[in-house]
């Protein structure tokens, strides 16, 4: 692949019954990116659906991928996609839901632990490194004593659904900013001053 190529993976679970779940927000962001770039997802030889597009004419190429496996087994498809595209983890951006960030907030980072996120855990194990870039899309903590595992497998609530298009747009903007300007510049743009 061209040297200015990025693999962008949106995490989630396959199937229509999961499409609106909080856990699938990573794949929702990839749908937003594909729509912006006029790209369509197609079945790929790796266990994923893939769409390819240039960020702009002559600009960076994005390989957008949604694994066809369940969240907890995302590593195999991501590893296969890296091999297929001949890219290293330095060119991998993973977009995923994050319980520890308030809803409607985006945080960007490279490397680090998986924080109990089974999709990230499986990717780190499969690719042999935690040093990929993450676009962490805040979904907030479950209310009361609701089990986090149940919470992530529920659709966004009414007020969240109204704000969701802006959140998806912001996360897609963040991916574009990482590719275009680098992680530090993207963090300066998307991380609110404390």
Image (cartoon, grey):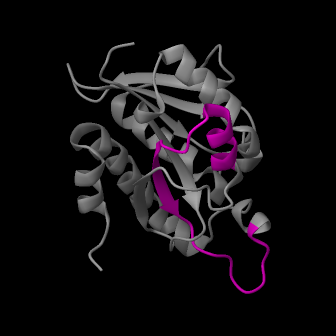
| Quadrant assignment for the C terminus | bottom left
Q: Closest to the observer: 62 or 40?
A: 62
The answer to whether residue 137 is magenta is yes
Above or below residue 27? Residue 149 is below
Along the horizontal axis of the image, is 180 left or right of 95? left
Along the horizontal axis of the image, is 123 left or right of 172? right
| Quadrant assignment for the N terminus | top left
Image-quadrant location for residue 104: bottom left
The residue under the point 54% across, 30% down is 65
Q: Position of residue 9 (x, y in %)?
A: 53, 37
Above or below residue 32? Residue 167 is below
Q: Position of residue 107 (x, y in %)?
A: 41, 61
Q: Position of residue 163 (x, y in %)?
A: 45, 67
Q: Position of residue 173 (x, y in %)?
A: 32, 49
The residue under the point 62% across, 65% down is 156
The residue under the point 62% across, 70% down is 157
Along the horizontal axis of the image, is 160 left or right of 141? left
Q: Closest to the observer: 86 or 170?
A: 86
The answer to whether residue 47 is magenta is no
The residue under the point 49% across, 67% down is 162
Image-quadrant location for residue 146: bottom right
Region of the chain picked out in magenta, as a range: 119-148
């Amino acid at each position: 692949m061209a040297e200015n190529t990025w693999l962008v993976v949106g995490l989630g679970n396959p199937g229509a019954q999961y499409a609106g779940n909080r856990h699938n927000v990573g794949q929702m962001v990839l749908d937003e990116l594909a729509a912006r770039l006029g790209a369509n997802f197609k079945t790929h030889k790796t266990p994923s659906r893939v769409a390819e597009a240039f960020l702009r004419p002559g600009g960076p190429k994005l390989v957008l991928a949604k694994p066809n496996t369940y969240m907890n087994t995302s590593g195999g498809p991501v590893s296969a996609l890296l091999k297929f595209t001949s890219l290293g983890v330095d060119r991998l951006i993973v977009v995923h839901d994050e319980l520890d960030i308030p809803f409607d907030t985006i945080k960007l980072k490279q490397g680090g632990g998986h924080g109990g996120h089974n999709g990230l855990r499986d990717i780190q194990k499969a690719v042999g490194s935690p040093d990929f870039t993450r676009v962490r899309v805040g979904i907030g903590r479950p209310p009361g004593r609701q089990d986090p595992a149940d919470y992530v497998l529920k659709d966004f609530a009414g007020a969240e659904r109204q704000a969701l298009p802006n959140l998806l747009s912001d996360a897609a903007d963040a991916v574009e900013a990482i590719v275009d300007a680098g992680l530090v510049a993207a963090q300066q743009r998307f991380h609110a001053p404390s």
